[in-house]
Amino acid sequence: MKNIIFIAPPAAGKGTMSKLLSDKYNYLHISTGDLLRKAKEKNDELGKQIESLLNSGKLLPDEIVYKVLDNCIKNIHNKLFILDGFPRNIDQVYYLEKLFKELNLNNYIVIYLDIDYDKAMARALGRLTCPICNKNYNKYIKSTKPKVENKCDICGSQLIIRNDDNEETFKIRYDTYIKETASILNYYKENNKLSVIIVNDNPQSMLKEIEKLLEV
Ligand code: AMP
């Protein structure tokens, strides 16, 4: 089995695919978005800093991201892992490369989830998220609707709409993706690490395609 790095525009399904894979194969799922949202809730100095930036749709400063990532990422050599939302710019790529070198870790693939702007926007505007287990649903897509309206299938919690899942912030997030993140695909392509999956509305069929890449 290989470790996985997901790179994708917002609302492409990184979180959903990570969850399916970690449930099935016991991956350690490291989502920088989830870590930042959790750190924000602490309401300490760092939490306050994060709060003012997180809903802007822009990337947070690397130092803040490394801080919330620190504990998880040091343990990655012990476990299969998925990086969901990291790296997101070229400096973060170099940070990770350095870490992988220190850990002598090369067993990973980078999966780009390919989706166009309109489809990603539609997905963001229909997304519902469980604040407890972080599972994502979509009220407009039959295969990913919650079984009971607005309730998490797994833990029964009331689903929420993320503060950044609105039209205005989505545009900024997508723009940020194009400006800062899309260019790192070239880096991984040149290093023969990149695979591409076209996003569709059926997470199970996407899972099968990813499994082919993982050779399981
Ligand atoms: P996500 O849950 O992956 O959509 O991330 C939500 C937000 O968290 C993003 O729009 C960014 O503001 C921030 N974020 C997540 N990961 C990173 C990262 N690697 N670098 C900088 N900001 C990040």
Image (tube, rainbow, N blue to C red):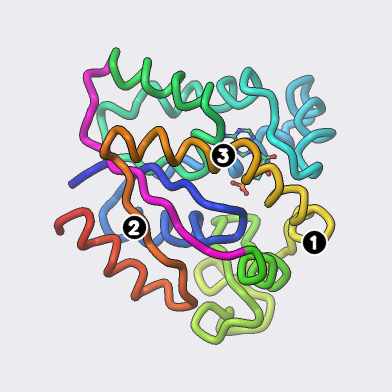
Q: Earlier in the sequence, mark 1 or mark 2?
A: 2
Residue range of the region highlighted in magenta in the rendering: 103-116
Identify which residue is drawn at 68% across, 72% down. Answer: 122
Q: Which residue is mark 2?
A: 21
Identify which residue is drawn at 18% across, 47% down. Answer: 1
Q: Which residue is mark 3?
A: 181
Taking 157 as reference, is 86 above or below it? Answer: above
Q: Quadrant of residue 109?
A: top left
CB at mark 1 closer than 8 A to ligand 1? no
| In this rendering, position of residue 169 left or right of residue 81 | right
- Mark 3 or mark 2, which is nearer to you? 3
Question: SS of the residue at dot 2?
Answer: helix
As shown in the figure, which amino acid type bears the numbered disc 3? Answer: Thr
Taking 211 as reference, is 182 above or below it? Answer: above
Estimate the x, y position of residue 96 in percent, counting from the top left. 41, 24
- Measure the alpha-carbon separation of dots 1 and 2: 27 Å
As shown in the figure, which amino acid type bears the numbered disc 2? Answer: Leu
Q: Residues within 10 Å of mark 1 (few under 14, many from 20)?
A: some
Question: SS of the residue at dot 3?
Answer: helix
* Labels 1 & 2 near each other (Cβ < 8 A): no
Estimate the x, y position of residue 35 in percent, counting from the top left. 59, 37
Q: Which mark is residue 166?
A: 1
Taking 175 as reference, is 98 above or below it? Answer: above
**Furthest residue toward left:** 215
As shown in the figure, which amino acid type bears the numbered disc 1? Answer: Asn
- Measure the alpha-carbon separation of dots 3 and 1: 20 Å
Q: Earlier in the sequence, mark 3 or mark 1?
A: 1
- Mark 1 or mark 2, which is nearer to you? 1
Identify which residue is drawn at 67% across, 83% down. Answer: 149
Taking 152 as reference, is 179 above or below it? Answer: above
CB at mark 2 closer than 8 A to ligand 1? no
